[in-house]
Image: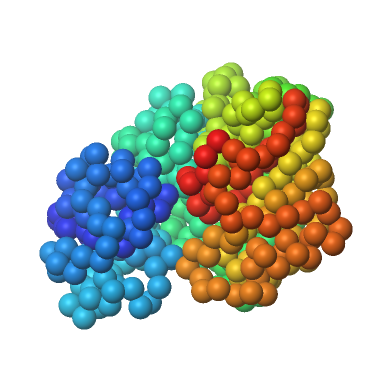
Amino acid sequence: MMKNLYNYYFIGIGGISMSALAKLLFDKGYGVMGSDACKSKETEKLKKLGIKVNYKPNIKDVELSDIVVTSSAISDDNKELKEAERLNKQILTRGELLGQISKTYKHVIAVSGAHGKTTTTALIAHIFMEAGLQPTVHIGGIMQGYESNLIEGRNKFFITEACEYKDNFLNLHPDFSVILNIEPEHLDYFKTFENVKKSFKQFAKQSKNFIAQEGLFDKGLTLGKDYAYSNFLETINGIEFDYYKNNTFVFHVKCPLHGKHNVFNILAAIAVAEKYNIYGQLTQKALASFKGVKRRSESYQFKNNSKLIFDYAHHPTEIKCSINSIKKFCKGDLIVIFQPHTYSRTKKLFSEFLQAFDGADKLIIFKTYPAREKYDRAGSAKILAKVLKQNKKCRYSTNYCILKKLNVKQDDCVLVFGAGDFYDKCKF
């Protein structure tokens, strides 16, 4: 792979990572086609580039391909996948393809962790771009200011998210890795938290260098120790703090991100930058000019002079952190809308979800985005809403127009959580 030109067929081409990889291969001269269950902004972007996208199974196009790529969301009984298997096509998972592509770059920088991967990857990418290093960036979100999930640069630096689901990140052997945090996540695959930790341990082992939060590993650089902070301050314009390296003050950080959890994301980005000789004022300026990532605290002016914020958070820890951060600046009611992502996550972390919304004044639980899963009543949004309703002002909804019908007053904040389809389908 990567030496001769092949025809690639992506099953699930509209996924945020899959679409980035499809664009990258297409721009390198490979033949690229694919399919997706539904039309989206990403599939429309691909079509504008000249990439054929099918919204129904297309066996003929599978036959014309040399290599078939599948995402983790694709079921084993998918018609196109079954046809590829029947024809003995080379089949790669998204993670395997990412691993192969990464080998064509001199330096691979990978960002992992249960939370914060996309923001941290974007921070590192922005610093490198501002330093004129022209990295190639593969990211699980749309970077504000670049308006893409892919930045194509030279073949020296490859900056990528490293997702642990189904051990996808073990296809990478980075020069420098970031391990932001480890939590019980993707338990539909890992089954136990011990298995999650084993995978992250292996990821650290196969990275030449890595930085992680204090207490996770005995080796490597440490966030909070080697790279530390003090004098944290949060305002309506973002966060700021003093950055210390090895107990020595280096510079003052200002960044238009919210939440104390982003301090470690920023420190990780600084550590990566320093590894590749980007220091001081250049990093300072890049952090101050960072525009963020869509769906990561993406805010809009809403009706009656209220604020509407979209956040990708779909794990209880992420949700609780965001609510606590936004609550500080919300002068009116904090209205939370949450779309659970998969039945298995809701079921496994049910008790944690019951505590995640304590800061909300009003709560709406939207119907579950099932992704790859079949209906499970015990892990459904409807059951979650029913239990939450016992102690909170909570209701259940299936209406994508709920924002239009929402009664809000001046200074209220509407905070929408979830990694599902509500973001693309809602109207406001």
- Location of residue 247 by image quarter: top right
**Total label count?**
0
Location of residue 337 with respect to 340 vertically, above or below: above
Give the image quarter of residue 382: bottom right
Whether residue 388 appears in this view of the structure is yes
x, y percent for residue 262: 67, 38
Q: Is residue 296 left or right of residue 63?
A: right
Which of 226 and 59 lies nearest the eye of the viewer?
Answer: 59
Residue, x 59% and y 56% (percent of image)? Answer: 398
| Residue 110 as seen in the image, left or right of residue 6 | right
Q: Quadrant of the N terminus?
A: bottom left
Horizontally, residue 82 falls left or right of residue 143, namely left
The residue at 46%/63% (across/down) is: 168
Which image quadrant for residue 329?
top right
In the image, residue 339 above or below residue 267: below
Structure colour scheme: rainbow
Residue 248 place in picture, x, y as percent: 75, 29
Quadrant for the C terminus, please.
top right
**Farthest residue, direction bottom:** 86
**Residue 282 drawn at (x, y percent):** 54, 21
> Residue at (50%, 52%) from the top-left corner?
421
Residue 19 can be seen in this image? no
**Which is nearer the eye, 426 or 243?**
426
Left or right of 270? Residue 33 is left
Foreground pick, 69 / 153: 69
Q: Nearer the viewer, residue 21 or 56?
A: 56
Q: Is residue 376 above or below residue 369?
A: below
Q: Is residue 329 above or below residue 354?
A: above
Point out residue 109 in the picture as x, y percentages from the top left corner.
47, 46
